[in-house]
Image (cartoon, rainbow, N blue to C red):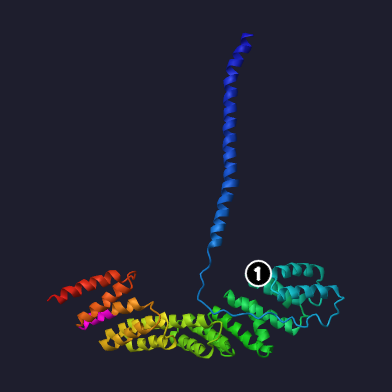
Amino acid sequence: MRREQYYNRVNIPIYRMITSFCMFLLFISTGLFLYFFFYQSMMNSLQDYNDGRKAPAPVYEQAQVTIPKISLQETIAPIPLVDKSARDAERIFTAYELGDNVLASRFIVDFITDYPQSPFIHKVRLVGAYIMNERGDYQTALSYIQKILGNSDITSEDYSEAVLLLGSISRERKQHDSYIQSFLEKAFFTASEPTKSKLAFYLGYLFLHKGEFQSSLSYFNQVIGEDGLLGKAALYQAQVMRPESINELENFLNSYPASSNYDYVKTTFIKENNLLAQELTIRGYLDSAERFYKKITQHFPDSAEGDQARIDMAELYYQKQNHEEALVQLHDVLKNNDTFKDPDALFVLGKISFEMDKQEEALGYFRSLIEKYPRSSYIAKAQEWQELIFESLKY
C-alpha cells in the first residue's frame, strides 16, 4: 500500500508535466495553422486588391478610333427561319444591335454549345469578340477571333471584319505580336478600299509599337482621311520629332473640325507647340519659339491656352528688349472674354511697366490685380511690388 502511494506521488507530477507540454504543443500548432491559412490568405487578398487598383501608365496618348459595328444586315435572310440555329442567331444579332450586350453574351454561350456546326457560328463568335473587346476582356476576344480565323470555310466578309478587330486590339494594347502581324499583312495585300486603308492604319501602329518607324510611316502614308494624319502624328511624337508632329496635327485641325478626335488633337497640338517653344527658348532661338507660340494664338485666339501663349510671347519680347510688343500681347489677353489668364497678364504688365520706368502705370496694374482677383496666387507678390513702387515714388 505504501509502495503504491509512493508511485502515485512520483507519477502525478510527471503526468502533469507531460499534459502541460502537450497543451503547449497544441497551442503552438493552432497558432501556426491560423497564421498560415488565415492571416497569409488575408494578406494575399489585400495585396491582390492593391495590385488591381494600380493602372498601367500609358506609353503615350493616342487618339480614339471608333470601331463600326459589324455588318449584320441580311445575315439571316438566305436561311429559312424554321432552322432553329437561324432563329437563335437572329436573337443574338437583335440583342447586339439594340445594345443589350449582357443578353447577347448569354445567348452566344448557349449558341456555341448547341450549334457548333451552324453556318452562323463565325458571325456569332465575331459578335462575341466585339462585345468582349468593348468590355476590355481582350483575351476572350482574341480567343473568339482565333477560332474564326482558324476555319477554312469562313467568308471573306467575316474574315475581313475579324482581322480588323484584331488590328484594333493590337493598337489599343500596343502589341506587335507576330501572329497578329501575319493576319493583318495577309488581309492587307488582298483587301480593297476602304478596308485596305483601315488595315494599313493598324499595321502602321503595329510597326510603331515594334519601333520600326520607317515601315510604320510607309503604311500610314497609305491611310485615307484623318486616320492617316493621326497615325503619322503619333509616329512623330514617339520619335520626339515635334515640328513634323505639329504639322500633321495642324493639317488635321484645318481639315477635320467636326471630327470626334478634334479635342484630342487640339490638346496635343497645344502641348507639342508649347514644349517645342520652351525648348527653343532655352536654346536661345527666341524668334523660332515665337513662331510656335503664334500657332496656338492663331488657331485658338479666344481660349485660355491662347492667352497663355500670348503671355509666353510677351516674356520672349521682353527678353528681346521689345517692350512695346510685349505690352501689346498682354493687352490682347485682357481684351478677351475669357478672364482666366487676366491675373497673369496684369502681373506681367506691372513688372514690364516698372522696368520701362512707368511706375504709375505699373502701380495701376498691380492695384487692379489686387482689387479684381483677391484670391489670385499673385496677390502676395503684387502687394510687394505695390509697396516697392510706393517707396520709389517718394523720392
- Residue extending furthest right? 82
Numbered disc 1: secondary structure: helix
* Magenta residues (range): 349-356
Where residue 377 appears, as percent x and y from the top left, is 33, 70
Where residue 49 appears, as percent x and y from the top left, is 56, 57
Residue in view at x 29 percent, y 85 percent? 327
Residue in view at x 33 percent, y 72 percent? 373
Q: Main secondary structure of the magenta part?
A: helix
- Corner quadrant of residue 367: bottom left
Q: Which residue is mark 1?
A: 139
Q: Is residue 217 above or below residue 128?
A: below
Relative depth, front residue between 379 and 101: 379
Amino acid at pointer 1: Gln
- Corner quadrant of residue 34: top right
Relative depth, front residue between 262 and 24: 262
Is 368 left, or right, of 231 in this rendering? left
